[in-house]
Image (tube, rainbow, N blue to C red):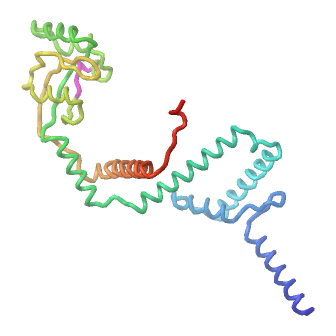
Amino acid sequence: MRVISKLLGVLLLAAAVSAQAADPATVNGKPIKQSLVDYIVKDATARGQKVDDNIRAVIINKLISSELIAQEAQKSGFDKQPDYQAKEELMRRELLVNSYLQDYVKKNPISDATLKSEYDKFKAQMGDKEFKASHILVKTEQEAKDIIAQLGKGGDFAKIAREKSLDPGSKDKGGDLGWFPPAAMVKPFSDAVSSLQKGKYTAAPVQTQFGWHVIKLEDTRDAQPPAFDKVKDELRNNLQKQQLEKLVNDLRAKAKIVDNTSKK
């Protein structure tokens, strides 16, 4: 029995020593967990940083410092304050949600075939023509009509745009919008441009949510869509966003949600 008792004592001591060795440090008896160090190293390595023994020592030292401050904050009761607890709950939830969504995207990748199909839709939306146009944006229909009348008497489009247009992006350029596909503009604007002949301006004001426009078509050319490889990442991001929106909508549809604020 004494032999067994001594053996158990040795095993328990060895286990205790092993447990102590597993964690790189303790702060007032509380361990700095090796798992935390391992995660930080893994994250840094994934971002391309080389982690050597010196970097590991810096990581451990920072964890010791943060643990000291955390312990002091707990002593002062800071972690019991309502504002802190609310913020902690929100941060924990955000971390959980973001981690889950990242994992969801990883497990549900957008296929190359889907990306190619989306690219074909993108090209179709762009159309087969691009336009170079200028415009003068004003607040009222009457102002736009007055400008059209002024142009009819030989007024200079660019000069009037610099004087009267409300569009800060094109005003100083004489109303020049550069080259664009029809899909880049709101429908009333693109419809008006598409119906114009080169060098002509709209005979009637064009209304959009931005105000009233007088539009002049400078030139047209065949559409020049960007190469697939140049927009592939953007297309993937857009599809992933739609994917996550669908996930949330599906969860909402299956959930029992009671909005108490709507009863007030």
Residue occupying image coordinates x 15% and y 41%: 127
Q: Which residues are magenta?
A: 173-177
Q: Is residue 127 left or right of residue 170?
A: left
Task: Determine the residue positioned at 18% across, 30% down.
Answer: 190
Q: Would you place residue 42 above or below residue 145 in this image?
A: below
In the picture, which quadrant includes the N terminus?
bottom right
Q: Is residue 5 above or below residue 73?
A: below
For the point 10% across and 8% down, which residue is it? 154
Residue that extends furthest to the right in the rendered view of this protein: 2
Task: Report whether 69 appears left or right of 125.
Answer: right
- Which quadrant of the figure contains the C terminus? top right
Does residue 62 sit above or below 33 in this rendering? above
- Residue 170, given in percent of the width and then of the height, sits at 27, 22
Front residue of 36/198: it is: 36
Name the spot of residue 32 as percent of width and height, x first.
Answer: 74, 61
Quadrant hosting residue 200: top left
Q: Let me know if residue 174 is in the magenta part.
A: yes
Is 263 situated above or below 98?
Answer: above
Indicate the position of residue 92 as horizontal and vertical percent values: 61, 50
Q: Is residue 235 magenta?
A: no
In which quadrant of the rendered view does residue 145 lie?
A: top left
Q: Judge by depth and name the residue closer to the eye, 91 or 161.
A: 91
The residue at the far front in this view is 263
**From the viewer's perspective, is 180 left or right of 247?**
left
